[in-house]
Image (cartoon, rainbow, N blue to C red):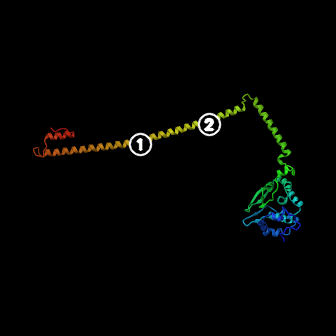
Amino acid sequence: MANRTVKDAHTVKGTNPQYLIEKIIRSRIYDCKYWKEECFALTAELLVDKAMELRYAGGVYSGNIKPAPFLCLTLKMLQIQPEKDIVIEFIKNEDFKYVRALGAFYLRLIGSSMDCYKYLEPLLNDYRKIRMQGRDGKFTLSHMDEFIDDLLREDRANDVILPRIQKRHILEEANEIEPRVSLLEADDLDEDLEDDDEDEEQVGKNRSSRMLEDDDYMPLQKRNDNDDRDRRERRRSRSRERERDRRGDRNKRERSRSRDRKRRRSRSRDRGGDRRDRNDRSQKDRDKDRRSDFDRKNRDRESGGGGGKDAMSVEETNKLRASLGLAPLK
């Protein structure tokens, strides 16, 4: 069958190499168009040409689990199981970065812990950009060293569960592998750092000599204390100004309230005085009308004759006029 592993293939991790990829993903790869058209009857030599055509790395994408060409070629390598020298050539290839990524991913699946650290760690110095396809089908920008670091540290890459490998510090304690030397610990970088330290020391010495020669030199601690004191004084002055402004605003509000109260009181008094004046004037008008009525009645009585029964005596008239505050009759 076209999907079977080659007869002379060796088992990996005690199982069929193709079983390193989960069954559901493996069945999706077998059903995809790229596997049927491009990966049919591939050999190790023809596999190189297909790897050079890769333009991105990725696992599966979309809701119905479509495999990327990168994952299809990985399964093809597990099926035909190329020789280790071919895989190492894939990793050492510097012209095609996706060929290198394919070889590194395949070696991480089938290789031992020693092989992974030996051949993959040098790729951490490769900082070229690569395109990665996510589960949603969108592309993101990554770098080769990030991809290799994920292969060495993570449990899953490109939607494939990676076989477990021993930690590096365990192999170092067993003296099976040399300690890794980073580029940051290179000799040329150390020399540059030493030169920078010497320059900084020289600048510091020149600065200290200038400070000592200056007549206005002040010790650093004393200067710091003076700066702190000045800051505290500025904070206090600002707080005093803010408190003064608050008091001024409070006094303005109180004065405005008192003026409003006085205005209301004066208005109420004015209204009460006007009301009293109107009452006094109405009372005077009533008294005036009463007097005029009384005088008219008296005149009528006097004109009708003084000897009648209805006529009032002069004394009674004067008493009544006196009670009203009028002048007596003569």
Viewer-nearest of discs 1 and 2: 2
Q: Is residue 251 above or below residue 115?
A: above
Compared across the picture, whether 319 is left or right of 8 comes to left
Residue 296 percent across, percent down from the top left: 18, 45
Q: Looking at the image, which residue is at 43% across and 41% down? A: 261
The amino acid pointed to by label 2 is Arg
Q: Mark 2 falls on what kind of element? A: helix
> Quarter of the image holding residue 13?
bottom right
The residue lying at 20 percent from left, 46 percent from top is 293
Q: Measured from the top left, where is residue 209 in percent x and y?
A: 78, 31
Residue 42: which numbered mark, if any? none
Question: Which quadrant holds the N terminus?
Answer: bottom right
Name the residue that disc number 2 marks.
235
Residue furthest out toward the left: 307
Q: Residues within 10 Å of mark 2 (few under 14, many from 20)?
A: few
Residue 76 position within the rendered picture, expressed as x and y whole percent measured from the top left: 83, 65
Out of 324 and 170, give the one closest to the viewer: 170
Give the number of the disc on residue 264.
Answer: 1
Q: Quadrant of the C terminus?
A: top left
Callout 1: few (<14), some (14-19), or many (20+) C-alpha neighbours within 10 Å?
few
Q: Residue at x 85, y 46 (%)?
A: 186
Q: From the viewer's perspective, tell me whether residue 68 is left or right of residue 303.
A: right
The secondary element bearing badge 1 is classed as helix
Q: Amino acid at mark 1?
A: Arg
From the viewer's perspective, is residue 159 above or below residue 208? Answer: below
Q: CA distance from mark 1 to mark 2?
A: 44 Å
Could you tell which of marks 1 and 2 lies nearer the N-terminus? 2
**In the shown orientation, is residue 15 left or right of residue 256?**
right
Q: Closest to the observer: 94 or 172?
A: 172
Tell me residue 52's x, y (percent): 84, 62
Count of all numbered marks drawn on residues in the image: 2
